[in-house]
Amino acid sequence: MQRTAPAPKPLVSILIPAHNAQEWIADTLRSAIAQTWVRKEIIVVDDGSTDQTHAIARQFEPQGVLVVRQENQGAAAARNKAFSLSRGDYIQWLDADDLLAPDKIAKQMAALDESGSQSTLFSSAWGVFLYRYYRANFIPTALWCDLSPVEWLLRKMGQNIYMQTATWLVSRRLTEAVGPWDTRLLGDDDGEYFCRVLLASDGVRFVGEGKVYYRGPGLAFGSLSHVGQSARKIDAHWLSMQLHIKYLRSLEDSERVGTACVRYLQNSLIYFYPERPDIVKQAEQIARDLGGKLQCPHLSWKYYWMRAVLGWRMAKQGQHLLLSFRWAATKFWDKTLFRIASRRPLGDPGM
């Protein structure tokens, strides 16, 4: 009796958009190469970097990394280009400054063997760090569990939480079903994209044993400069928010969905108030249509006096400046400690 050869394991494509990431790209590529899942391909799309990102990435070509270059078009366009070059059965998105634990993909592929469905979306644990990845802070949220698409979006929007981009492992079937990344979106393209993936999926399987090390964006992390003062970024963020609400309501149009959407609008109102009264007016109307009402956004108590004396704009600028100073000091101190300490190899079990 002739034995049939076992089917090859799925190929996983690790896709990395990069722009002016010369300080981090080498470590990111080492973490991708170190994956214990053997059948993988690694593709870097350099999105018009003006530093040494392209040259550093090319040093890894002998280890099987494909590096291509395009004119600067933004992260979404770079991701679309990387996917067009890929052949993988599963897609691992990875930003050029983040790290994967060596067994991240292998842990999620083991969960795939249990579920057996290419329509399942896999997520993982993630921790924030600046320079010392081995000091990453892993803080579980309400998204760190198995969830249906509607429950996942309800929690994300209602509780103002999210899942970091590199945590996801997505089948090619799902990736092709949802279409390309939206190049109109500048700051929340990943949030909108994975909303669409969720809509096409049969649910999220959380794999806590897999880990992602997210290099915290500092000032942008949970602060006003997540959007900033750029009119293009503000408009793009508002578009992403409207799409989020549309996607959730397409799954379920209920009172609890309306409540989550109003909370989502309220949490983000500070990005637009008072500089963009047009968007504030639209947000208030959407909230009313959902049966809710928006309140004037709140600043931290530390800025109440500034708002009372100098007004909203100056209070927001003051918050921005103070956060900038704190971020710069924190980054400098962590970088100093990182240089003093002997660096562990990426595959260290203590990672």
Image (cartoon, rainbow, N blue to C red):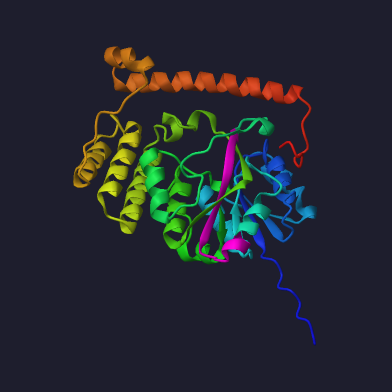
Placement of 74 over or under 135, stated as above or below: below
Q: Is residue 24 visible?
A: yes
In the displayed structure image, the side of residue 271 where residue 335 appears, left or right: right
- In the rendered image, residue 53, in percent from the top left (x then y), is placed at 67, 42
Q: Which residue is pictured at 70% across the width and 66% down the height? A: 9
In the displayed structure image, the side of residue 186 where residue 117 appears, left or right: right
Q: Which residue is pictured at 23% across the width and 45% down the height? A: 286
Placement of 33 over or under 293, stated as above or below: below
Report the front residue among 243 and 73: 243
Report the front residue among 41 and 17: 41
Q: Is residue 124 magenta?
A: yes
Q: Quadrant of residue 267?
A: top left
Q: Which residues are magenta?
A: 112-128
Q: Quadrant of residue 237?
A: top left
Q: Is residue 73 visible?
A: no
Placement of 263 over or under 111, stated as above or below: above
Report the front residue among 253 and 31: 253
In the displayed structure image, the side of residue 131 where residue 312 appears, left or right: left
Q: Is residue 273 magenta?
A: no
- In the rendered image, residue 266, in percent from the top left (x then y), is placed at 30, 35
- In the rendered image, residue 334, in percent from the top left (x then y), is placed at 65, 23
* Residue furthest out toward the bottom: 1
